[in-house]
Amino acid sequence: MKRAKRPVVASALATAMMLTAMAPMPAVAGSMAGDRPGEIAMIADTIIARPVLLASTVVGAGLFVVTLPFSLLGGNTGEAGNVLVMNPGKNTFVRCLGCTPAQHESLKAEKATKDHQEDVASAE
């Protein structure tokens, strides 16, 4: 009986610890969307994420070329190109260093708003 009880208790404890650790994440993720990335995020992005994204862009381009006849027959060439080549390419070369995609979109919208306000102010 003791042997059967130990794995059940260990599993319940591990599950409780994981759920407790994950509980505050949505609140933190929402508040960090507008923050600028730190130096650790930039270093990790440079060393790990960008090479992986570059490789996925190259592999996606190869897959796009291989599946192009099927995409032409199915009529979804644009969608296949966006998913396999454009999205990884944008994240590799356009996204700000260290930013998550949500941070990048937030900063891009903030910059567009600022540029629009400057255009309106200069027109007056």
Image: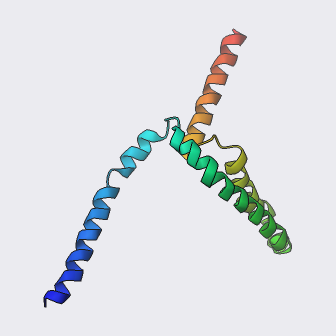
Question: What residue sits 28% from the left and 69% below the top?
Answer: 14
Q: Quadrant of residue 61?
A: bottom right
Question: What residue sits 17% from the left and 84% below the top?
Answer: 5
Q: Is residue 39 visible?
A: yes
In front of the other: 76 or 90:
90
Q: Position of residue 89 (x, y in %)?
A: 73, 52
Would you place residue 8 above or below residue 34 in this image? below
Q: Position of residue 108 (x, y in %)?
A: 62, 35
Quarter of the image where the C terminus is located: top right
Q: Position of residue 34 (x, y in %)?
A: 50, 36
Residue found farthest to the left: 1
Say whether residue 61 is left or right of residue 25. Answer: right
Would you place residue 64 above or below residue 96 in this image? below
Q: Position of residue 55 (x, y in %)?
A: 72, 61
Would you place residue 22 above or below residue 117 in this image? below
Count of numbered marks: 0
Q: Quadrant of residue 77?
A: bottom right
Quarter of the image where the N terminus is located: bottom left
Would you place residue 94 above or below residue 5 in this image? above
Q: Quadrant of residue 111?
A: top right
Coloring basis for residues:
rainbow
Say whether residue 30 is left or right of residue 115. Answer: left
Say whether residue 16 is left or right of residue 102. Answer: left
In front of the other: 76 or 21:
21
Question: What residue sits 39% from the left and 50% below the top?
Answer: 26
Residue found farthest to the bottom: 1
Q: Is residue 99 visible?
A: no
